[in-house]
Amino acid sequence: VTVLPTREAAVVPAPRADTAPRSMTLLGATGSVGRSTVDLLLADPARYRVETVVGGRDVAALARTAVTLGARFAVLADPESYAALSDALAGTGVEVAAGADAVVEAASRPVDWTLAAISGTAGLPSALAAIRRGGHLAIANKECFVCAGVPFMREAARHGATILPVDSEHNAVFQALAGGRRQDVEKVVLTASGGPFRNWSRAQMETAGIADALRHPTWSMGRKITIDSATLMNKGLELIEAHHLFGLPPAQLDVLVHPQSVVHGLVHWRDGSVLAGLAATDMRILISYCLGWPERIETQCAKLDLAKVGTLSFETPDFERFPALRIARDALEVGGGSPAVLNAANEIAVEAFLQGRIGFMEIVNLVESTLIQADRLGMLRTPASVEDAMVLDREARALAGRQLASA
Ligand SMILES: NC(=O)c1ccc[n+]([C@@H]2O[C@H](COP(=O)([O-])OP(=O)(O)OC[C@H]3O[C@@H](n4cnc5c(N)ncnc54)[C@H](OP(=O)(O)O)[C@@H]3O)[C@@H](O)[C@H]2O)c1
């Protein structure tokens, strides 16, 4: 298995012929991370051969992506979209499929490199299929780790899959960890921009609207993760992700608010040294690292200009105003099924907020009440397998839905 960058891992080239184009599958090809990846592939098309592109329901975007990349296979999760996708790609020679099973089948096809960038736990079955056939998995979908961390990592180890973190904070830590031995790590720190409400009072946040919450100060991302960044739940999910990715206990994981989003993650070593990962706020930089790993590839991204940035500032997070971070941290410490329930309830709550059904601060209330109720109902069992975690995810969604209806 890979995941953990040791000195050795950082210098040993991947076992592949550099002259042959790398075959790849893009899960979530039409999303924010997917589009950034497409940009990188188009900058050096001879280097890559895209086998499969997968999307949710956006027919036009997926068809366009498939044609632009010269993909052989295009798959949408929405089964109703099959006819429209077939029409859109008629005469292009691109094979077409639709439905959840087709997504998993597509992810199981052998390729050198897969991007897992479907949003939410909907991305778990296909990411699992990809790790079960080994190869390199560049993973943006943090929900895989939060919902099914232990069994997911076990599957990766069993099948010799190489997991490369796309998430900027984990990518930075992954790179910084190459600077020493695992046993010499004192702690790992993930930074958070603080989101659009960093300076808002609790009372102001009670009245925050959808547009306010979607106005992220430093990153341009999909809607779900942008709302999670406003509640700071995103940072809580990332702590859980880091715990599984890097095999570190909760006590060695910390969060710092850093409004400029220049330093993405830090590794503190036991001798007092600190290695930090910095980059401009452009996901293509982090994705390119996963694309080239263990080498680096040239990108056209704007380079970080620290003189222009001028000042870097850091604050401890405010758990009072951002209770989601506290609740996620508690779920990490409690372990078992708590992170899976937390994640499922959060997905339902964010969706309800985006539909205008609940207020901003009610997102975290719904997550907390679902966790309390799940505990009462004895649902917080440790998932024995990824499939078991998916069952728990469905049960927790149903419970959160009932909590929402009765609120
Ligand atoms: N955006 C970032 O900068 C960023 C940074 C770090 C981590 N991440 C993580 O990366 C993941 C993707 O984030 P994003 O911001 O790129 O999300 P996004 O813009 O909402 O894109 C989501 C992608 O998933 C597809 N999709 C949605 N539901 C699906 C389903 N049931 N089956 C198959 N495909 C489905 C969407 O297709 P349609 O277009 O057809 O809906 C789209 O291609 C999330 O887990 C997020 O936490 C994102």
Image: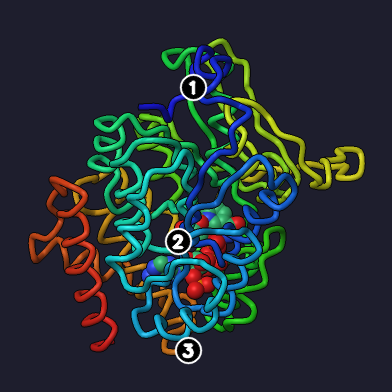
Q: Amino acid at mark 1?
A: Pro
Q: Is residue 143 left or right of residue 21?
A: left
Q: Mark 3 = which residue?
A: 356
Residue 233 visible? The answer is no
- The residue nearer to you, when weighing 86 against 53, is 86
Q: Position of residue 48 (x, y in %)?
A: 61, 44
Secondary element type, mark 1? loop
In three-dimensional space, the C-alpha distance between marks 3 and 2, rounded to whole angstroms, equals 23 Å
Q: Earlier in the sequence, mark 1 or mark 3?
A: 1
Secondary element type, mark 3? loop
In three-dimensional space, the C-alpha distance between marks 1 and 2, rounded to whole angstroms, equals 27 Å
Q: Mark 2 = which residue?
A: 118
* In the image, the residue with mark 2 has its CB under 8 Å from the nearest atom of ligand 1: yes
- The residue nearer to you, when weighing 10 against 193, is 10
In three-dimensional space, the C-alpha distance between marks 1 and 3, rounded to whole angstroms, equals 50 Å
Nearest to viewer (mark 1 / mark 2): 1
Q: Earlier in the sequence, mark 3 or mark 2?
A: 2
Q: Position of residue 80 (x, y in %)?
A: 36, 85
Residue, x 29% and y 83% (percent of image)? 404
Q: Amino acid at mark 2?
A: Ile
Q: Mark 1 = which residue?
A: 15
Q: Quadrant of the N terminus?
A: top left
Compared with residue 195, is residue 295 higher up or lower down, i.e. above or below? above
Residue, x 40% and y 63% (percent of image)? 120
Q: Residue furthest left?
A: 378
Q: Is residue 291 left or right of residue 332?
A: right
Residue 39 image label: none
Secondary element type, mark 2? loop
Which of the 4 quarters of the picture holds residue 220? bottom right
